[in-house]
Image (tube, rainbow, N blue to C red):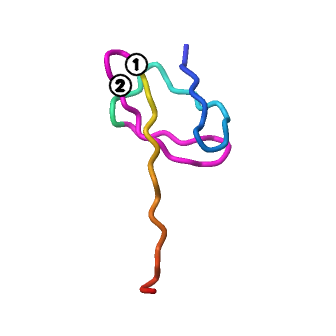
């Protein structure tokens, strides 16, 4: 049964598959926020990935 973790941005449920690997990337189906999966001692956590915006040389 997949694990569900709430998105830190919008609060929607993110389904984490049972066969997820440490370091794998997942994204929120609602807002699109990307996360890196961190597995420590059998616990699955999501690490927020901040996307740098282009400054276009400004």
Q: Are marks 1 and 2 in contact (CB under 8 Å)?
A: yes
Q: Give the x, y percent position of residue 30.
A: 68, 43
Pick whichever, 6 or 28, lies toward us. Answer: 6
Q: Residues within 10 Å of mark 2 (few under 14, many from 20)?
A: some
The tally of labels here is 2
Callout 1 secondary element: strand
C-alpha distance separating marks 1 and 2: 5 Å
Q: Which residue is mark 1?
A: 43
Q: Quadrant of the N terminus?
A: top right
Tag of residue 39: 2
Please report the residue visible at 41 percent of the width from the left and 26 percent of the height from the top: 20
Compared to 31, does 14 lie above or below? Answer: above
Compared to 27, does 51 lie above or below? Answer: below
Compared to 8, does 4 lie above or below? Answer: above
Q: Residue 23's image quarter?
A: top left
Callout 2 secondary element: strand
Q: Quadrant of the C terminus?
A: bottom left
Q: Is residue 30 left or right of residue 44?
A: right
In magenta, the rendered stretch is 24-42
Q: Does the magenta portion include 19?
A: no
Please report the residue visible at 44 percent of the width from the left and 49 percent of the height from the top: 49
Compared to 16, does 7 lie above or below? Answer: below
Q: Residue 27's image quarter?
A: top right
Residue most toward the bottom? 58
Q: Residues within 10 Å of mark 1 (few under 14, many from 20)?
A: few
Q: Is residue 17 left or right of residue 28?
A: left
Please report the residue visible at 40 percent of the width from the left and 18 percent of the height from the top: 43
Please report the residue visible at 44 percent of the width from the left and 64 percent of the height from the top: 52
């Amino acid at each position: 049964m997949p694990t569900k973790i709430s998105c830190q941005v919008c609060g929607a449920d993110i389904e984490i598959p049972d066969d997820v690997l440490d370091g794998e990337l997942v994204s929120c189906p609602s807002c699109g926020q990307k996360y890196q999966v961190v597995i420590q001692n059998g616990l699955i956590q999501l690490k927020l990935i901040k996307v740098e915006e282009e400054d276009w040389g400004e």
